[in-house]
Amino acid sequence: MADTNAVAAGPLPAGSQAPEFTLQSAPNQTISLRDYRGKPVILAFYPADWSPVCGDQMALYNEVLSEFEGYGARLLGISVDGAWCHRAFADQRRLHFPLLADFEPKGAVARQYGVYRDGDGFAERALFVIDGDGIVRWSYVSPIDVNPGADGILRALETLAGERTPA
Amino acid sequence: MSKRGAAATLTLPVGKRDHIQGPGGAAVTLVEYGDYECPHCGRAYPIVKAIQQRMGPRLRFVYRNFPLRESHPHAQRAAEAAEAAGAQGKFWEMHDRLFERQFALDGEYLIEYAGDLGLDVGRFRKELGDGVYEPRVREDFRSGVTSGVNGTPSFFINGVRHDDSWELEPLLAALEAAVATR
């Protein structure tokens, strides 16, 4: 993917209130951030469905889902693709977590989180870990052509879990 | 704590548990996290071989399992088969066989390969059936996840994830650069 355009404003930093949203998770269904209150949420913004196999970020997270769920966390993928596109992509890759359509108005949620790439028309590869109170606890933007992996997410979840268990 | 682009590093250092080719004192260590059913890993396999040939004893090569079970239905079992062969001293022979026969990784083929390699097939079959090496493969997988493995194959050069191309020339150049900066 060309990296020729201006990058986004920068991701909302740790400590920010995570902006509320309601997006389509399927052609006739929506998901809101507030549905997950009380649980950590991982928001994974990515540029587009259908990037190459095996190196694909969503396919990787699908494999690591049980590790995330071990922390009681829920994973939400978000891109500007529409709900039908997401459905075909999720079916084909057998993804076991929701993909949200930041489709209309296009990229509105990505903008709120500071990770929309204006010239490109899609989101950064940006990760947010949001705690059960709706506060951003960790955020990260990967170079657009580098799949960020899951290590940062797991470290952030581990830190969160550590806070809840008094030493 | 927001940041951009810190290089991912190995959380599980290379050690006794690993399958290693090349001398312990080699100038550079290349770790691959791979999946026997992944076509990209299949393409990387002869590239690594060529690099080993060119670098000789200056290179130490380590292979760890990262089966993408949702994408590749045979990957987990194939990884366990290589470990089962390893328990009988034939890890690399099985590793090579699996990459050369990526298109035939069904259970019966795995048994056939064990026979071809002169393994104790009864033991191999039983260990595979009992899932003896399942925890070991999961341990590899987890170490990959915490190290920032982001797909297969993922390479680490002296413990740092190699984010550039793994085609022969760029990978070789990166390894030579690691030797030079030692």
Image: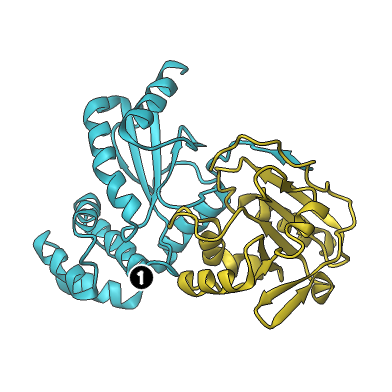
Determine whether, in the image, residue B36 is placed left or right of residue A118. Answer: left
Determine whether, in the image, residue A30 is placed left or right of residue A46. Answer: right
Amino acid beneath label 1: Val
In this picture the colour scheme is by chain
Q: Residue at x 40, y 61 (%)?
A: B67
| Residue B133 at x, y percent in the picture | 36, 66
Shade representing chain A: yellow
Place residue A136 in its image quadrant. bottom right
Where disc 1 sits, the SS reads: loop
Label 1 crowd bin: few (<14), some (14–19), many (20+), radius 10 Å: some
| Residue A17 at x, y percent in the picture | 90, 57
Determine whether, in the image, residue A105 is placed left or right of residue A4. Answer: right
Q: Residue at x 77, y 51 (%)?
A: A138
Shade representing chain B: cyan
- In the picture of the structure, the residue carrying the numbered disc 1 is B132
Q: Which residue is drawn at 23% across and 26% down?
A: B54
